[in-house]
Amino acid sequence: MDQEASKDIWNLFDREDVDMIDRIVIGTTFDHVMVKREDVPRVIEAFEAFEGDTNLKEQAEALRELLKDVEHVAFAWNQTSVNAGEWMHSGIFDGEDELPYNFKTQDRHFWLFDELDKTAEAQHEK
């Protein structure tokens, strides 16, 4: 897929005329996106409702299982095969070893539903 076609798809995330299910699914594919624990049920619902030949229903089940552990407070994906696991790279080293990304102390991520809320607020201000 060429870069322009990719941008057209990514831009659907910001459009209020696009179903929220689709916007959530698209948002989970973005680099640096995270979901707070309290918002995971919304992702599960979107993954289960999304139509198409995907593995989203399996991802929904995996999220359901992960929610059973109360120590999981945030969730992130690497939904691409074209880069390394970005969450394993923080840019912070302990000797020669790079530490995994820490969302509590680093700010390279954004929260999926905070971004959706900002988009909605911006649309309503127009």
Image (cartoon, rainbow, N blue to C red):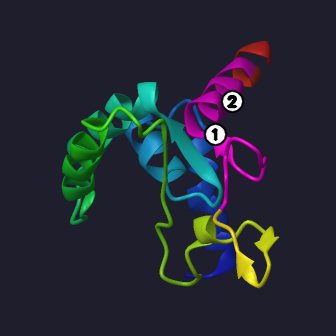
* Left or right: 14, with 93 as reference point: left
Amino acid type, label 2: Thr
Indicate whether residue 97 is drawn in magenta: no
Residue at image location 51% in from the left, 59% down from the top: 29
Q: Are marks 2 and 1 in contact (CB under 8 Å)?
A: yes
Residue at image location 30% in from the left, 37% down from the top: 67
**The quarter of the displayed image where residue 86 is located:** bottom right
Amino acid type, label 1: Asp
Location of residue 112 with respect to 101 vertically, above or below? above
Question: In which quadrant is the N terminus drawn?
Answer: bottom right
Residue at image location 67% in from the left, 60% down from the top: 101
Location of residue 55 with respect to 12 vertically, above or below? below
Q: Which residue is mark 1?
A: 14
Q: Position of residue 65 (x, y in %)?
A: 21, 45
* Left or right: 53, with 37 as reference point: left
Residue at image location 65% in from the left, 56% down from the top: 32
**The one of 33 and 54 positioned closer to us in this rendering:** 33
Location of residue 98 with respect to 46 vertically, above or below? below
